[in-house]
Amino acid sequence: MSPRYAPLVPADELASPASYRQLRREREAARFRREIEAIVDGACRAEPAGPLLRDTFTSLSGNLAAEGALSFAGLVAPERFDSARRAYDSAIDTRGSRGSLHNYLNVADAGSLVEHPEFREAFAHPLLVALVAHALGGPVKIIDLRAKDTQPLDVVARDNTLHVDNSPFMDEFKVIVTWTMGTGRGPSGQGLTYLPRTNRLLRQCFVDDDGTAWSDEDSCIFPSQARVDEALAAQARFFDDGRPRVVHLQDIATPCHTIFAASRLVHHRYRTSAGGPRSAIMAAFHRTDEGTGFLGASDLSGSALDRFLLATGDGRPFLELLADEMPRVVAALAAAASRPGLVVDPDRHLLRDEGFRAWYERLSAGVSLDRLRRATLATAADDDTPLAQRLVLRMQYDLQGALNMPLYTDLREEVRKRARIVIREMTPEHIRDIVTRYDLAALLRAQSAPQRRPVSELAEELHDVLVALRRLLSTAVASRPAGPIWGSTDGNAAALSLRRFIVDLCVAAADVGDDASLTTGCVFGALGSVLADDLFDLGAAGREVTGELFGMYLRLAASSLGERPAHPEKEKLDTYLESVNEERQTAKLASEVWFQAASAEVTARNDDFVRALLRRVLPPGRPSPESGDLGALLADPAALSAHYWKRVVVGKPVAVRFGAADLDTLDGYFGLTAERSLPAAVVRLREETTPGSPAEHLLRGIERLASRRGRSHAEACRDVMSRLSAHWPDLVHLCRGGPDAPPLPADRILSTLHDAIGAVDEEGGRSRRSSSGVPSPRAGSAEVLLTTAEARELARVYMLARFCFSAEEFRVAQLLAGDPRVRYAVLATHLYLVDEVSLSASELVEAWSTAKILLPFTEAFVNVSGYSSSVIDLVPNPKLITVVSNNLLPAVAGELLRRDASVDELDADILAAGVQAAVRRGVFDVTIGLFHQTDRRDVVSVSGLSRRVCPAVRPFGAFCQRWLPYFFDSHPSAPTGRTFMQCST
């Protein structure tokens, strides 16, 4: 075997065309197609619209051959489909696998379901069968029939990455019927997605030195950007404009029946969190002369054609049975010719523009199963799920992982498929039975932390153990009946399948090259060994092999399941998360949006906690940024910008949840919001503030102080808010008149403050912190009431404290935001920040056993996998560009204006001085109103105001002051570059 990926090629480029049986019998297939066409033609000739019906069949079969897929909407009458759906729901609810990614049922194991005529009609309607047989060029049987329910879920796993099915040396067609779970509507999510016309190509095979041709399952998938690009490029040759086409079958009004060339057409199930849950029936069709067996359903009543397809038939030839069903075929052709929408137009379901980009980015990012598994296990640990149950969860995920098994020209891999799917789709109950039978939870607790060993060494160990199991099976005789886990499969068939599976698993293990494949190989081997012992009674030697395989698996899985002691400062994190979490993302949002403020004391403790984390996460920096991955990008500003945007796109869905704007280009994040200049903010507040409201009283107080002291509104606002935060309880006590008086409206308090400010100024400028106009501090606090609208209006007014820049400073800042060197410096600094913290952030998550420890840093970077996952993949949050543009660049502009310098004269020293000025001018000083919900939805209370400085400002300011100038001077157009030592000094 080999880890190589095989390209899609025309037949004349195959390395061993004689190995492809579909190419060896093209003349025979053409003759068979003519026979089907003659039967259809004869049936249509008696109809008034005979030529139209015949042409309709020709058109349908031609489209299927040309495009690789053909879909019908509502092929089965609604009342008949509803009966089939109810039978399906009952069977899968009671007998489904309830796996980590889907709920699976082998329909052959649910005899009552396959005996349902309306159910069979959904996937084996005679028109569908005629079209499949015409496409394959011979009599057909159904060799696999499965039901599968899937929930909306953002995941790319092995079974839904872009792929072609594992049958390179023969053709396999499938019929898939999809609908919205529990309804008679068509699919609204999780739709079949395919690249039309890729069925015109074949998968290249490998040829050994002795001429043996073979392939493997990795050759069938497209799990990376390079492979996705390869598939799109292969497809493009069949379109005149050379542009890719991707069809996504969703938002269809009625159940959708699709025939497609599964072994040739590049396709997948596009799983996202959008749309509704999906139910599906999938029937796999092979030619009868492939020798791949048949489904093995019991003898069925009703259609003889159904019995031929699903059971043993009655000895009559396929074409004779198909001819008997021509009245139903003709009726369906008449409906297809006359009913708009019955034949689905794939062009109406093409992914376009943003839809195509989102699909491409998701598929290019590769398999995401590991992130989902880690998130699920982290949640289970947080919920104190028992260890044995967590182990079952882990095994269910690992059974859906990568397993690259061999494919042969003689199709002998078909024998193993039953064993493989029985193991892969084990129900939680079956896995739990094995876990408890072998007391694996106790074994797991006893595992010590394993020493890290190379994957190649572990793979060799796995291979050796599997070889020992293969040898035991080669001489063993199946002495026990197949258990319930095998469903309708008898003991002999189970034994044959399991033997073949273990043989091929040995081949796969010899070529394992990564942790995920190693883990999957171990769990399949361990469970396969258990099933082998159940069937063959392998004795002490078999139990020893099973123990070794489980031991290997548990050593690999232990790190995600082991129970670890809590971090000694866990209480601090718990306190922080009570007020600041994924929903209430900052202390300010918690108070002013959710009205769930922490007390001033708790906020202060949280700020100390965040400062301590920052010191841990944000080290001083490497000796030089050029020594890391960033160094290769610094010489090319365009490449740097493209790399930054690529990283942002990967994590943008998470970043948007944490405050970033959902913009399509990088330019938008550098757009300064001109309304944040102080003059614009004052004008806006004067126009929008409600007369007589608490906000209006506060604004009047700010304006009075600004006017009489000759200060800016921002400075006056900071002064007023300092008075309020210090003297709030005393103002409330003064206005209320007694501790037992009912809560006051907020406007009374702020009106009193306004009058007090006037009294102070009239007395000639006493100290604003000890004036007779404002009472001296008193212990305790007090609540006043205001409406939710008044609270939000009040919060907008005291934001004036941060709007400290003039209109001219904002005008110059807009010029700076468009300067290539400034942009380059901002992007490089942000990338360097994320690079710097990645290792220490991972160590932090490891130490605290939760990614929630990274929530304080979401304005700078986000974790692609979210905060319930232990997978750490940090990307820049572009919100930080907006923060820098609106808060640092105007301060830099102020330094330019103060020095009477132009934008072109900006240098590293002025840039550093601007960062210092931003901190000095209070742009990061924060006021938080301590708002709380009351028993009335439209009324909140406020118990005071908290003045604080953003806890990140000192370390973040120091980082920017150090690295923005450095990268500004690193731009290729800079006249002279600073050395690292100059920058550090």
Image: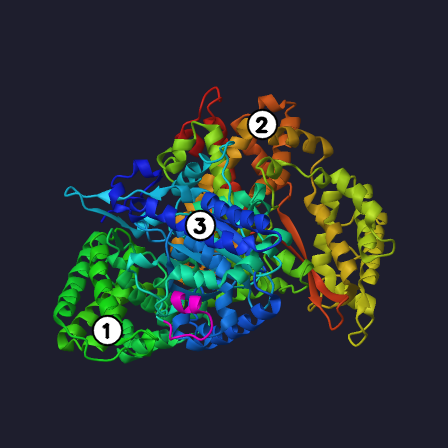
Distance (Cα) linking label 1 and label 2:
75 Å
* Residue 635 x/y as whole percent: 42, 27
Q: Which amino acid does label 2 sit on?
A: Asp
Disc 2 to disc 3, how far (Cα)?
Answer: 45 Å
* Image mark for residue 267: 3
Q: Do the residues labelled 3 and 1 touch (CB within 8 Å)?
A: no
Q: Which amino acid does label 3 sit on?
A: His
* Residue 966 visible in the snapshot: no
Secondary element type, mark 3: strand
Label at residue 492: 1
Nearer to us in this view, 592 or 431: 431
Answer whether residue 296 is magenta in the image. no
Say which of 287 and 504 sits in front. 287
Q: Whole-Å distance between the Cαs marked 3 and 1? A: 35 Å
Residue stretch rendered in magenta on the structure? 297-309
Q: Which of marks 1 and 2 is nearer the N terminus?
A: 1
Q: How crowded is mark 2: few (under 14 residues within 10 Å), some or many (20 or more)?
A: few
Task: Name the residue type under label 1.
Answer: Asn
